[in-house]
Image (cartoon, grey):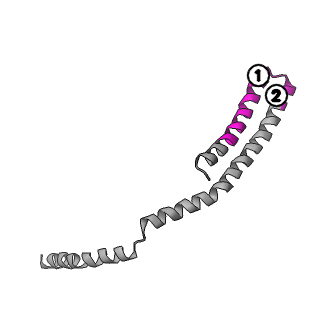
């Protein structure tokens, strides 16, 4: 029983030391937020270019798929073409709108 009380006293004595050391080592929250903001903004141009590239690749794949459907005489070629074209336009528009909306 006595050792348990001794441990509790030791913990209570070391707690202020722990809080002081954590407060001295902790960084400013605003500095961390600003650093994260700068890093995200620096990657945003690359992310936008990646979205454009994915849209271009999807456009090429869609063009080949629509061409093969058209050559086989499939009656729903227009619907497939609209779906692929719409997805490519969506990627480009989303990348552009996000870029202009957030002012990056």
> Could you classify mark 1 by the number of other residues whose Cα lies within 10 Å: few (under 14), some (14-19), or many (20 or more)?
few
The relative height of residue 93 versus residue 22 in the rendered view (above or below) is above
Secondary element at tag 1: loop
Percent across and percent down for residue 62 are 77, 36
Query: For residue 89, what is the image quadrant?
Result: top right
User: Which residues, given as a range, are shown in magenta?
Assistant: 67-93
Please identify the dominant SS of the magenta region.
helix
Residue 34 image label: none
Foreground residue among 42 and 86? 42
Residue for point 34% across, 78% down: 21
Task: Please say whether residue 81 is one of the residues in the magenta stretch.
Answer: yes
Q: Is the N terminus in the top left, top right, bottom left or bottom right quadrant?
A: bottom left
Residue for point 30% across, 74% down: 19
Q: Residue furthest left?
A: 1
Query: For residue 73, what is the image quadrant?
Result: top right
Task: Please say whether residue 42 is one of the residues in the magenta stretch.
Answer: no
Percent across and percent down for residue 7 are 20, 77
Percent across and percent down for residue 48 are 67, 50
Residue 69 image label: 2
Query: For residue 84, what is the image quadrant?
Result: top right
Residue pointed to by mark 1:
76
Secondary element at tag 2: helix
The relative height of residue 31 versus residue 11 in the rendered view (above or below) is above
The relative height of residue 91 versus residue 16 in the rendered view (above or below) is above
């Amino acid at each position: 029983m006595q050792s348990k009380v001794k441990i509790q006293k030791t913990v209570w004595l070391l707690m202020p030391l722990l809080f002081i050391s954590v407060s001295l080592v902790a960084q400013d929250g605003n500095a961390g937020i600003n650093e994260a903001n700068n890093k995200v903004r620096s990657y945003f141009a690359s992310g936008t270019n990646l979205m454009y590239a994915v849209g271009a690749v999807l456009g090429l794949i869609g063009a080949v798929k629509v061409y093969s459907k058209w050559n086989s005489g499939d009656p729903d070629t227009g619907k497939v073409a609209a779906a692929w074209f719409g997805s490519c336009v969506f990627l480009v528009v989303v990348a552009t709108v996000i870029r202009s909306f957030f002012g990056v």
